[in-house]
Amino acid sequence: FAKAMVDALLKSLNISRDSCTLFDSYGGKFDAAIVCHEVRCINLSPGEKPCVTFNVSGHRVVGAEPFPIGSLCHLRSLQLDTAITVKIWAAFDDLPTVPMAERRVCGEARIPLKHVASRMDGSLYHTWVNLESAGLNDSVASMGYMGSGVLTESADAFAQAIMSGPRQLFQPKACISICRTEDLSPDGRIQWAADLPRTLRIARWGPLLRSQQQHAVMCAAQHLQGSQRSGQSEGLHRLLHLKAQAEEQARQLESLQEQIQSVSDDSTAPTSASALDSLLKGGDRFQQPPSMTLLEERAQRQVHEALGVAQHVEAGAARRGREAEAQQELDRQRNLAVQLQSELTQVQVELSKLGDEANSKIEAANVRIRSLRRERDEALAAIEHRKQGNAKLQGDIEELEQEKAQLNEQKEALIRIVEDLHNSCTNAGLPSADRASIDSITGFKLP
């Protein structure tokens, strides 16, 4: 159910599971953190302490170093197609300096990382997993029974171990959490607080809901087991009481038989039921002793009645136990349905808020993009206009340069003409009174 709701969440956001940022780092190697919070039903001897080792398939370094229960272990450079073997040990010495020879294995669980990434939303959070016999997978693989479908079989076995973990109360099990190293809390623990950002709460909602469902199933199973024990105890007390009554009636029957045997030679026994009743009620105050047949019939009838009452009580206790279990299961399912419905409503509200925020941000971004495009177009038009103005000014400058050159040529020609005229006047003996005007003309220069 949790996986379906997470898929619906991703679909409503138009995000595929493969492209979700939660699985971005699974394309290559990644670092992870794992912790075993608690173990149950591993049959420890007096003085023994549990410890745990984590072994990654395909790594050179085998996870021989034991960790105390509840300690965090960092696993480096993992790959998606590997599996983590969690092995529980029991030892008498202090940890983690216990040699391999001084501890015994209690069970193991194989965690395929690909199944965790694709089916468990990328992490486990306080999840109960049933333990298998140590070395079972290695023995089966060594005998050749596991071929190309080993990953599929390992994933199926892991899913079955998670499903049966909270239901089989007396099976050895371990409570495990695993996540990426960057998903650890600021204090370096696998502990998700309620004040996380909304995106992280949505991303981690699936593992958290799965853990809550497991613990709800475990509490219901423990409650049903307690109810069954109380019902069985009550029925046992009732059966013991009926057995004591039957034994008392048997002793009374033997006493009556002895009395009948003692008086059978001196009197004639009555054959009526009233005489038998007077014998049973008054002891030896009857006038005539009852017959042996009536006593045996009465005793047999009482024994049959006692057995019938015992069977009826036992059947009623069993029926009441089944009805109580069914009613408790029905109430639990109803409460769980109501809780899940409320959680679904909350998630839908959060999805609606996220959709509105996303739409408003997209609209604002579109407005900003349109404004920037308009400003860009205006700037390009202004640049083009200035380029055209610069080209026109350049043309005007070139024309003015040409005109200047022509005027310089004309000035030089006029100067030469004036010089020739002055020389001619001087040679002809004309007075030089007008020399100042000629000098003024020759001294004039254009800029």
Image: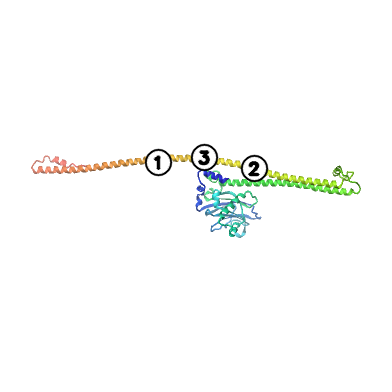
* Three-letter amino acid code of the residue under disc 2: Leu
What color scheme is it? rainbow
The circle on residue 353 is 3
Q: Quadrant of the N terminus?
A: top right
- Give the x, y percent position of residue 191: 56, 47
The amino acid on which the numbered mark 3 sits, given as a three-letter code, is Lys
> How far is mark 2 from mark 3, CA to CA?
34 Å
Left or right of 379? Residue 394 is: left
Q: Residue at x 50, y 40 (%)?
A: 355
Task: Note whether 85 is above or below 285 in the view shown.
Answer: below
Q: CA distance from mark 1 to mark 2?
A: 63 Å
Instruction: Answer with mark 2 or mark 3, whichever residue precedes in sequence.
Output: 2
Q: Which mark is residue 373?
A: 1
The image quadrant that residue 48 belongs to is bottom right
Reply above or below: 402 against 65: above
Dot label at residue 330: 2
Camera sees residue 25: yes
Of all residues, the one furthest to the left in this rendering is 429
Q: Earlier in the sequence, mark 1 or mark 2?
A: 2
